[in-house]
Every structure is written in C-alpha cells, then in structure tokens.
Image (spheres, rainbow, N blue to C red):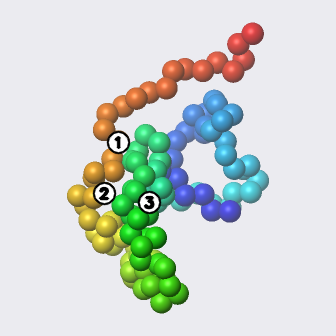
C-alpha cells in the first residue's frame, strides 16, 4: 500500500495517539508527501471538501463516453500535481483552505 500524506511529521507525533495510526505499518510500502493529494475530499486542518467538484463529477460522468472524457481531463490529461491545481484554478484551491487554527485539546490515554 502507498500512503499519500499531506505532511510528514515526526514518528512521535503519530505514535502519541493510537487514533492516528490508520494503516498498520507492515502494510505500507511507501509514503508520499503530496499536499492537496486527497482533493476533492477534505483533510482536517488543511482544506475542506470540494462540493462543487463532486457535483461536476456526478453531472459529467453519466455515460461511459462522458466518464472517459472526465478521466481524460482530470486524470490522464494532467501530467503532475501542479497541472492538476492549475486546471482546478488557484482561486478555487485557495477557497478550500482552512481559515485559522482550531486545535484539539490534549488527550491522556493512560489516565487512571
């Protein structure tokens, strides 16, 4: 399995909270740092869900021919992440960014 990560953090940050380990390490072949790689899905603390992209996808893929055209535009037609973001539009991408910080409270899983 290849894990696509928004950010690479120190191992201690991940292992400090069991809820942060979503994939067993033995199943991971590689980790790729690719900011924005989950688009159009959201990544908590980084960017929100691109509802408009999902609407465009559903409207534009109703037939096999439409689906092929959509894949040509958004998958086969973009050589890299930068081209994908350019096709999406910088303004649209910036509009998805989280505004401000909302930090979670510290958690102590070993409290008695």
Please, what secondary structure does the residue beneath circle 2 have?
helix
Q: Residue at x 66, y 36 (%)?
A: 19
> Is 94 placed left or right of 5 in the picture?
left
Residue tagged by mark 3? 40
Q: Are marks 1 and 3 in contact (CB under 8 Å)?
A: no
Residue 98 numbered tag: 1
Query: Where on the picture, by quarter, is residue 91?
Result: bottom left
Please, what secondary structure does the residue beneath circle 1 have?
loop
Residue 9 lies, in percent from the top left, at 52, 42
Counting other residues with Cα less than 10 Å from the Cα at mark 3, is it few (<14), some (14-19), or many (20 or more)? some
Please, what secondary structure does the residue beneath circle 3 have?
loop
Query: Residue lying furthest left in this view?
Result: 91
Residue tagged by mark 2? 93
> Is 87 placed left or right of 9 in the picture?
left
On-image quarter of the N terminus: bottom right
On-image quarter of the C terminus: top right
Query: Gap in Å between the C-alphas at discs 3 and 2?
Result: 10 Å
From this view, report whether residue 66 is shown above or below residue 29.
below
Q: Residue at x 63, y 62 (%)?
A: 2
């Amino acid at each position: 399995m290849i894990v696509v990560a928004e950010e690479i953090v120190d191992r201690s940050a991940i292992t400090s909270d069991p809820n942060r380990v979503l994939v067993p390490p033995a199943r991971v072949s590689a980790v790729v740092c690719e900011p924005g790689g989950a688009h159009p899905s959201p990544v908590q603390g980084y960017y929100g869900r691109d509802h408009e992209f999902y609407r465009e996808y559903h409207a534009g893929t109703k037939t096999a021919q439409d689906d092929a055209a959509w894949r040509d535009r958004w998958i086969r037609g973009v050589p890299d992440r930068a081209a994908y973001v350019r096709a999406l539009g910088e303004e649209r991408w910036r509009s998805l960014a989280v505004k401000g910080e909302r930090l979670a409270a510290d958690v102590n899983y070993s409290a008695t």
